[in-house]
Amino acid sequence: MDGPGYERRCGFVALVGAPNAGKSTLTNHLVGAKVSIVTHKAQTTRSRIRGIAMVGDAQIILVDTPGIFRPKRRLDRAMVHAAWAGAGDADVIVLVADAARGRVDEDTRGIIEALKANGQRAVLALNKVDGMKRERLLPIAAEFSELFDFDAVFMISALTGSGCDDLKKLLAERMPKGPWHYPEDELSDLPMRLMAAEVTREQVFLKLHDELPYEATVETDIWTERDDGSVRIDQTIYVERDNQRMIVLGKGGRKIREMGQLSREQLEAMLERRVHLFLFVKVREDWQEDRERFTTWGLEWDV
């Protein structure tokens, strides 16, 4: 029941930044649960995943956009287009930058120029400040402030949560008055089948990042609710070449069993019930040029 003086707020916050700046880790920290794929590889977020954070009477809908970089392939172009579309729809834009780089990198500089050209406002979150001395941080913050007039600057560690509560408080205050878009206990609007595929895709990246940089994707083929309350999930890992299929399987199927176990454990924690996960590997040479895949990820084909 809404009490006296109770006024709901709700709005969208776009987290933009260069690949690997820590946007997904920040999304997960602000939401308080895992909704976005996190690896040390750049460009792992393909679609705009909305995480939902609650602060008092405010609902913050976080749009974790793909990293903005110079696109080469069609998939790259679609990801960058999705990132800017997410920023255009937002009530607040947060530029997440990797402070540990010690300077404004080329991709981040390009984002700042685009923000200026579009006449957009932004908040700066200087991430990965863990263990960095103040005298090293101040010149970096000054360099950013010379390039753009940020509404506010936060020094944060998305990994440890340092500084994140202050950022979250500001975002809540900036949300426009209005009804909530989602139920209070909802964490993401990403369909569960897609979320399950993201969990397995993360394991593929973590386990095979050297041998298989970006030539793999995961799809949930079948989701079966069982009478005992558990769920059976059948997924296919798609690769582009036959030798990559052997890499995913590993000697005697060891790698795929290992990834399956880790993925299943994460899914059971997220779903709070027993999960029976079955993984298959198939070769599909042109999956990165498949229009249907783009639709599944919420990306546009003709950009």
Image (cartoon, helix red, strand yellow):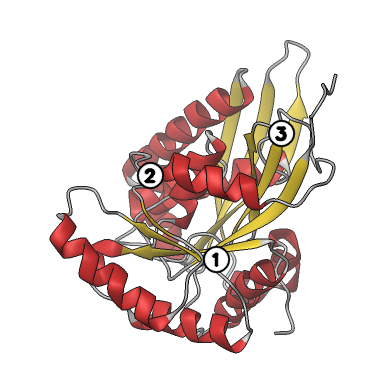
Circle 2: element type? loop
Q: Which mark is residue 163?
A: 2
Of mark 3 and mark 2, the one earlier in the sequence is 3
The residue carrying pointer 3 sits among few (fewer than 14), some (14 to 19) or many (20 or more) residues within 10 Å by Cα, namely some
Please indicate, yes or no, whether residue 299 appears anywhere in the rendered image. yes
The residue carrying pointer 2 sits among few (fewer than 14), some (14 to 19) or many (20 or more) residues within 10 Å by Cα, namely some
Of mark 1 and mark 3, the one earlier in the sequence is 3
Question: How many discs mark residues in the rendered view?
Answer: 3
Please indicate, yes or no, whether residue 280 appears anywhere in the rendered image. no
Question: Residue 216 location, x and y as percent?
Answer: 50, 61
Q: Are marks 2 and 1 in contact (CB under 8 Å)?
A: no
Residue drawn where x is 14% and y is 61% of the image? 135
The residue mark sitting in front, 2 or 1, is: 2
Left or right, residue 58 beside residue 67: right
Q: Mark 1 points at which residue?
A: 66
Q: Along the line of sight, which residue is nearer the eye, 237 or 109?
A: 109
